[in-house]
Image (spheres, coloured by chain):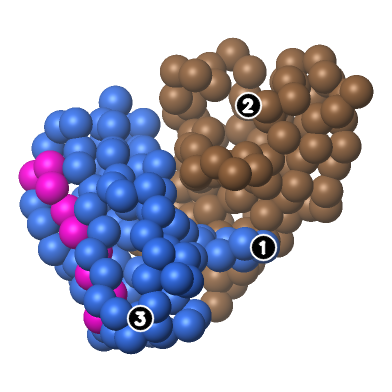
Chain colours: A brown, B blue
Amino acid sequence: QVQLVQSGAEVKKPGASVKVSCKASEYRFTSYDMHWVRQAPGQGLQWLGWIDPDSGGTYYPHNFQGRVTMTRDTSTSTVYMDLRRLKSDDTATYYCARASRVGLAPIEYWGQGTLVTVSS
Amino acid sequence: EIVLTQSPGTLSLSPGERVTLSCRASQTVGSNFLAWYQHKPGQAPRLLIYGSSRRATGIPDRFSGSGSETDFTLTINRLEPEDFAVYYCHQYRSSPVTFGGGTKVEIK
């Protein structure tokens, strides 16, 4: 069964950076893109982008370009999401998530979520 | 970017009722690239429907999806107590993938 285990909660000050990890297991790590999605308190789901764990290629939506970086370590089957210049409205639960299959496919598997709190 | 608009924002219903949720896309999504999720507080979202109308593994048949191009519907027959949650539609036809704003189904 696909497992995605994320790092623990973080508290950061405005202007700082946060790096969240997501360790994958029970499937071939390099075969499936990994997405990052967040949910701010009282808000909906917002997509931050994806990384191809095989090539390291990434795609970030326009509103996160320049502020988010996704990387991977194939030796440990772990992906990382680094978000810089944090603001209070970056306070959210961040999820890594994997699609159900290769190619155009819905996100089916989710990590447990990591709460990032940005507060002075 | 494909914008997904869900309506209504909130529905107040009783167990046993039937509910229909709407998701409208700003551009065509086709019929194969629209999914629905159920999201409860403190949990990860749960995939209910993909490909507009296909139930994900383990999803009860009281959940059904329909639609194509720009108009999609999620129907829940006979609401169970565990169905009260927020529901999101999601298009994965093109990047950036996007989610709708959600519809909250609450107990009346």
Magenta-colored stretch includes residue A20: no
Decide which of A31, B54 is in the foreground and name it.
B54
Quadrant in which the C terminus of chain B appears: bottom left
User: Eyeballing the image, is B57 above or below A88?
Assistant: below
* Residue stretch rendered in magenta on the structure: B69-77
Label 3: which secondary element = loop
Tell me whether circle 1 and circle 2 mark residues in contact (CB < 8 Å): no
Q: Earlier in the sequence, mark 1 or mark 3?
A: 1
Q: Which residue is mark 1?
A: B42
The residue that appears at 75% across and 47% down in the rendered structure is A115
Magenta-colored stretch includes residue B72: yes
**CA–CA distance in space, label 3 to label 2:** 41 Å
Residue A92 on image: x %, y %: 68, 40
Locate residue B37: give its quadrant.
bottom left
Q: Which mark is residue B72?
A: none
Q: Which residue is mark 3?
A: B79
The residue that appears at 25% across and 76% down in the rendered structure is B18
B71 relative position to B39: left or right: left
B71 relative position to B98: left or right: left
The residue that appears at 35% across and 81% down in the rendered structure is B79
**CA–CA distance in space, label 1 to label 2:** 26 Å
Three-letter code for the amino acid on which mark 3 is drawn: Leu
- Callout 1 and callout 3 share a chain: yes
Three-letter code for the amino acid on which mark 2 is drawn: Thr
Closer to us: mark 1 or mark 2?
A: 1
Dot 3, crowdedness within 10 Å: few (<14), some or many (≥20)?
many
**CA–CA distance in space, label 1 to label 3:** 21 Å
Q: Which residue is mark 2?
A: A69
